[in-house]
Amino acid sequence: MDIQKIIEDVIAKIKADPEILKLFTTDPIAAVKKLVNIDLDMSQLNEIVDGVKGKIDLSSLGDVGDVVEAAKNVDAGGIVDKIKGLFGK
């Protein structure tokens, strides 16, 4: 079994699918299990996770960090005022 090949495949799939990226950032072991489709022991799974984390900067891929930053820039007061306007208060 070529662990380096598996790592490269996992990286390609993470970059191609935002849902896989989200899963990898929250539960990397589950993401690898889902992507690999072969029975691996925990040491192999951890080796793959570490390899993926070592080769890509997850923060540069967008995902959760961008969503959090965008949410910080939302004018919540304006939204609250609009909701109050709907109810006439």
Image (cartoon, rainbow, N blue to C red):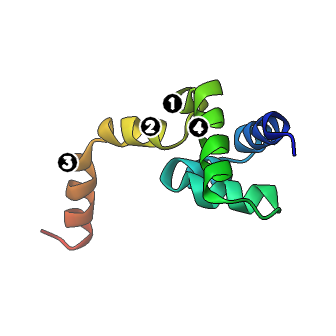
Q: Secondary structure at mark 2?
A: helix
Q: Amino acid at mark 4?
A: Asp
Q: Is residue 15 above or below residue 37?
A: above
Residue receiving disc 1? 59
* Residue toward you, 25 or 28: 28
Given residues 16 and 56, the one toward you in this image is: 56
- The reply to whether callout 2 and callout 1 are in contact (CB within 8 Å) is yes
Q: Which residue is mark 2?
A: 65
Image x and y of residue 62, in percent: 56, 34
Amino acid at pointer 2: Gly
Query: CA gap, disc 4 to disc 3?
Result: 42 Å
Residue that carries the numbered disc 3 in the rendered image: 77
Local crowd at mark 2 within 10 Å, few (<14), some, or many (≥20)?
A: few
- Residue 26 position, x and y percent, is 49, 54
Q: What is the distance, in whole Å, between disc 3 and disc 2 at their CAs?
A: 23 Å
Residue 28 located left or right of residue 68 = right
Q: CA distance from mark 1 to mark 4?
A: 16 Å
Give the mark nearest the N terminus, 1 or 4.
4
Of badges 1 and 3, the one in the foreground is: 1
- In this view of the protein, which residue sits in the foreground, 82 or 17? 17
Q: Which amino acid type is shown beneath numbered disc 1?
A: Ser
Residue that badge 4 annotates = 50
Q: CA distance from mark 2 to mark 1?
A: 7 Å
Examine the rendered structure and indicate whether residue 31 appears above or below residue 56. Answer: below
User: How far apart are the alpha carbons under marks 4 and 2?
Assistant: 20 Å
